[in-house]
Image (cartoon, rainbow, N blue to C red):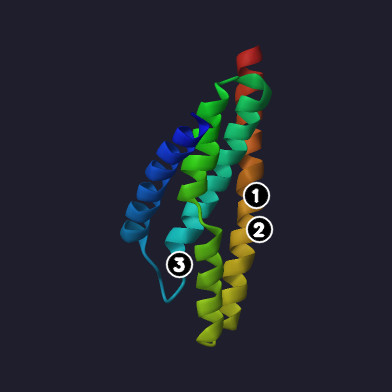
C-alpha cells in the first residue's frame, strides 16, 4: 500500500510540475519555474512535516504519498543542478551562482517558514 500512495502522489506532483513549468517558463536562461516550484515544495514539506509529526497525526501512507510522492515529484533537484550547469556553460557564471544561492538559501528559508506557519497554526489552535 505505501507504494501506491507514493505512486499516486508522484503522478500528481509530476503533472503539477510540468504544468507550472510550462506556464511560468524561464527568463534569460534563468529557470524561474524550477526555482518557484522548489521553494513552494520546501515551504509545503516544512509545514507538512511539522504538522503531521506531532500535531495533526495522519495515516503514514497519506503522509508518505504527499511528502515523498507528491512533493518529491513536484520538486526537482536534478533540474536545478542542470539549469545551474547550463548557465555556467554559456558563460553566465554570476547568474549560475545567483541561481544556486537563491535555490539553496531560499529553500532553507521556505522550509523554515513552513515550520513557523505550522507552529503558529498549532499555537493558535491550542488557545
C-beta proximity under 8 Å, tags 3 and 2: no
Q: What residue sits 57% from the left and 75% below the top?
A: 96
Q: What is the spatial separation of the Cα atoms under label 1 and label 2, in whole angstroms? A: 6 Å
Q: Which residue is mark 2?
A: 105
Q: What residue sits 55% from the left and 30% below the top?
A: 63
Front one among 25 and 62: 62
Q: Within 10 Å of the Cα at label 3, are there few (<14), some (14-19), or many (20+) other Cα atoms?
A: some
Q: Within 10 Å of the Cα at label 2, are there few (<14), some (14-19), or many (20+) other Cα atoms?
A: few
Front one among 116 and 42: 42
- Residue 59, above or below 112: above
The mark nearer the N terminus, 1 or 3, is 3
Q: Nearer the observer, disc 1 or disc 3?
A: 3
Q: Position of residue 73 (x, y in %)?
A: 47, 49
C-beta proximity under 8 Å, tags 1 and 2: yes
The answer to whether residue 114 is left or right of residue 76 is right
Q: What residue sits 50% from the left and 52% below the top?
A: 75
Q: What is the spatial separation of the Cα atoms under label 1 and label 3, in whole angstroms? A: 19 Å
* Residue at the top extreme, as displayed: 127
Q: Secondary structure at mark 1?
A: helix
Q: Secondary structure at mark 2?
A: helix
Q: Position of residue 108 (x, y in %)?
A: 66, 51
Amino acid at each position: 500500500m505505501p507504494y501506491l500512495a507514493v505512486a499516486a502522489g508522484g503522478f500528481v506532483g509530476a503533472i503539477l510540475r510540468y504544468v507550472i513549468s510550462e506556464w511560468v517558463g524561464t527568463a534569460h536562461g534563468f529557470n524561474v519555474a524550477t526555482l518557484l516550484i522548489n521553494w513552494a515544495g520546501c515551504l509545503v514539506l516544512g509545514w507538512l512535516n511539522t504538522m503531521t509529526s506531532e500535531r495533526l497525526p495522519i495515516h503514514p501512507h497519506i503522509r508518505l504519498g504527499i511528502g515523498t510522492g507528491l512533493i518529491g515529484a513536484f520538486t526537482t533537484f536534478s533540474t536545478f543542478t542542470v539549469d545551474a550547469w547550463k548557465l555556467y556553460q554559456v558563460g553566465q557564471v554570476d547568474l549560475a551562482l545567483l541561481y544556486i544561492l537563491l535555490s539553496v538559501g531560499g529553500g532553507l528559508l521556505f522550509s523554515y517558514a513552513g515550520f513557523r506557519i505550522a507552529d503558529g497554526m498549532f499555537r493558535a489552535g491550542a488557545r
